Amino acid sequence: MWNYICVSGFFLIVSFLYHYYITIQPVSVIQYPKENYDYIVVGAGTAGCVIASRLSESPNTTVLLIEAGGYFNWLTTVPLAAPLMQSTNVDWSYKTESQYYSSRALKNFQQLWPRGKGLGGSGQLNYLVHSFGIADDYKDWPPGWSYADLQPYFRKVSSIMNLPGTEPDGPLLDALIRVDTTLFDGKVTIEKAKNTIKRGGRWSTFNAYLQNAWNRENFHILTDTLVTKILFNNKSIVEGIKVRFGSENFKIINVNRELIVCAGAIGSPHLMMVSGIGPFDQLQSNQVPIIRNIPQIGKNLYDHLNLPMYVNLKMPVSITLRKMQTIAELIKYFIFETGLLATNGIIGNIVRNNSSVVLFGVGSTDEKLLKDVANFKTESFRSLFPSYNNNSWEGFLYLINCMKPRSRGNITLASDSILDPPKIDPAYLEYAEDILCTQDGIRLALEVLNTESFRKLGAKVHLPNIKECRHFHQDYDNPDYSECIIRYAALTGHHPGGTCRMGVDNDSVVDDKLMVNGVKKLRIVDASIIPNPMSGTPNSVIIAIAERAVDIIREN
């Protein structure tokens, strides 16, 4: 035991010292900004890192990137450590409003929505899964934004972001790719998971873009600085921003060409509304001086909702906490950048129509961490995850979701201050179609389990004994039982978007150039502009959007 503790501590200390002392303070990170810049970028998340880095390539252009947080610690580079970052100082730690149609197994019926707060944003605490979606995802996007139009940007992003990343391997993947999909109803596709892992570590736009740019003289970065308001003249033209750094220090910074907001699906509509741009009723009821009435800001909020379905295994083929904590695995990771810790645990994806099943190959679950991270009630958590008190339990998780949910929610103001988090109501499962779509995903997951390759592993689905669902026959084939479990146990997929929708119609928030309608010198580039849910994770799509946005800005 002492040998294990000493070796573990040694490698942790060495890693910490490496990341803390070897990293040199970048030239671009400053304490006090200039009075004005050509471009100001708000938010150093996935999109903001791309926009600021690309625009600063022109030496005659001055660029300021503003981030409310600071640096993420070294632990975030470990792919499987993603949950450890949630509910810490690098997480905005948003909570939804109490949900009516879903989330019944969660405290106060509220979902926790982690969003990255620091350089790299949510790209520094996500699960690193890559997807560009499918062509059909883009059919309602404006001209110039079709799947075909974006292909050059997809290729560019693939090169820069090290795609397809580190390929998963092992017996679970072997079992998955041996599944004969011709035996199933409908067209079923199975593919290995893709990710943005490089040399065993997290590879985000912080690594691929920002770190390559942050020693340029014309590029400034303000950390731990909150943009409190966008400032306009009397002609609805952006003049600058008001920021707060430190506890009580406020400053106005002017912008010459454009203000580019990259604060995310929650932060961007929130900043718009407290600055006087948004639905008239929202602004008026919160005593916000009205600059421009744009009714759809904060509307059209969507998110994927994942049902966790636990599968027990007889064969020792999954990732467990005990395996991850061995001296051998620590040596593999810290010395050779390989092993279990160098993966994100995502094995593959199974799709039929709009139903998606993600295979997450981690068997044991840490109740102290995951129960609170997901906001589960204790009884519900233990009912869903039989491995809650056993760190060597063999099994895996299916994460089942409807890729194109119909339900839409909204983000509204809690007050006129940026310091008060907005009200977030995703309205999960308001439409019955979302239940039916998820139930088809359940059937698909069970069909895969019934194949020879998974039977050889001793795979058997776990049936949660949630108190409120006990009066139904406990079988996922029973639609009443499965609907009950979905409404109680399904969790956020961490993919919010749509709240500043891009389009060419009168109800859109930004146009096909991503400029905010009705005002000048103001552009939004992040997940909030994506009109509809993607058939997959949106992070790589956001990078491609940011790359194209830079080309649009340069053309102008």
Image (cartoon, rainbow, N blue to C red):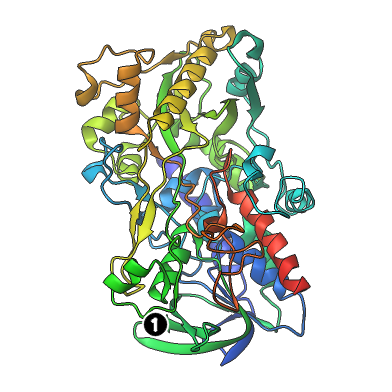
Which of the two residues, 551 or 2, is positioned nearer the viewer here?
A: 551
Q: Quadrant of the C terminus?
A: bottom right
Q: Quadrant of the N terminus?
A: top left
Q: Position of residue 166 (x, y in %)?
A: 67, 39
Q: Is residue 203 left or right of residue 3?
A: right
The answer to whether residue 14 is seen in the rendering is: no
Which of the two residues, 83 or 123, is positioned nearer the viewer here?
A: 123
Which of the two residues, 538 or 291, is positioned nearer the viewer here?
A: 291
The answer to which quarter of the image holds residue 53 is: bottom right
Which of the two residues, 84 or 151, is positioned nearer the viewer here?
A: 151
The answer to which quarter of the image holds residue 410 is: bottom left
The residue positioned 48% from the left and 32% from the top of the image is 402
The image shows residue 234, relative to residue 407, as above or below, that is: below
Q: What residue type is disc 1 on? A: Gly
Q: Position of residue 363 (x, y in %)?
A: 44, 27
Q: Position of residue 41 (x, y in %)?
A: 58, 74
The residue positioned 62% from the left and 41% from the top of the image is 137
Q: Position of residue 216 (x, y in %)?
A: 71, 79
Disc 1 residue crowd, few under 14, some 14–19, many 20+, Cα 10 Å: few
The image shows residue 477, relative to residue 106, as above or below, that is: above
Q: Which residue is mark 1?
A: 246
The answer to whether residue 198 is seen in the rendering is: yes
Q: Is residue 511 left or right of residue 291?
A: right
Q: Is residue 550 left or right of residue 399?
A: right
Q: Which residue ends up furthest to the bottom in the rendered image? A: 35
Q: Which residue ends up furthest to the front in the rendered image? A: 506
The residue positioned 71% from the left and 61% from the top of the image is 547
